[in-house]
Image: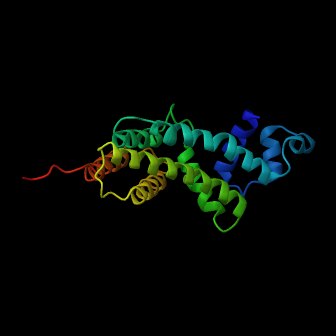
Amino acid sequence: MHRLCGKGLEIFNEKGYYNTSLDDILKQLSLSKGAFYHHFKSKEDYFISIVQNLIVQKVYALLIEPLNTEENPLPIIVESLENALEPGKKNEMAYGFMLNDFLTEFNKRNEEISGYLKDILNVWEVNLVSVLKKGKLDGYIARHVDCEGVATYIIASYLGMRSLMMDSSNRQLKYQYVQQLKHYFKSLEPQPVMA
């Protein structure tokens, strides 16, 4: 099943969901229609299985799991974003790119799949808000900070960087983004009180 999902993700990523026919999938997977329908009800069901089995796991491992911390969450968030933007072994297929691409492709075209993809972002957002609020309670983040607004900014900036870095691993672009993010996070820290 993992192989079927992995190969399917490559196919959908390369051609797009709507430009990929069932015949394309069967050919690439070396499957008969009967074997395919034994595992999946439809192309849509197959894609949903891919989202649930691969994209959710990868986004969780890269962007959500690191947030389980008792430390200052701000440097941990920066590190998780930096790792998620890194091409190579840690991030074999650029799942963040894919999530962004698929969100765009399915927007207003397929409510069910859009819902699954948006759920991934919602889970990330809830975890970000939670860790930011805990950071406020622990004194790492200023009390006036709008945690929901910061979480929205983090997600939007990450997805935006993913779009800008598409088809390249522009290290300078990534470096500039990370530096600006650190600068922004510095502004969220409590400021010393002047006497």
| Count of marks overlaid on the render | 0
Percent coordinates x, y for residue 147 in the rendering? 39, 55
Q: Residue furthest top?
A: 89
Q: Is residue 38 above or below residue 98?
A: above
Q: Which corner quadrant of the image does residue 72 belong to?
A: top left
Q: Where, by quadrant of the figure, is residue 131 drawn?
A: top left
Which residue is outermost to the right?
34
Tell me the quarter of the picture where residue 119 sits: bottom right
What x and y, as percent, mark residue 75? 34, 40
Q: Residue at x 69, y 49 (%)?
A: 12
Q: Is residue 166 left or right of residue 79?
A: right
Task: State the quadrant of the N terminus.
Answer: top right
State the image coordinates of residue 195 (x, y, percent, origin top left). 6, 52
Compared across the picture, whether 112 is left or right of 175 comes to: right
Q: Nearer the viewer, residue 121 or 194?
A: 194
- Residue at 37% across, 46% down: 174
> In the displayed structure, would residue 111 be above or below residue 64?
below
Tell me the colour scheme of the image: rainbow
Q: Which residue is most to the left?
A: 195
Q: Is residue 60 above or below residue 21?
A: above
* Image position of 59 (left or right of 149): right
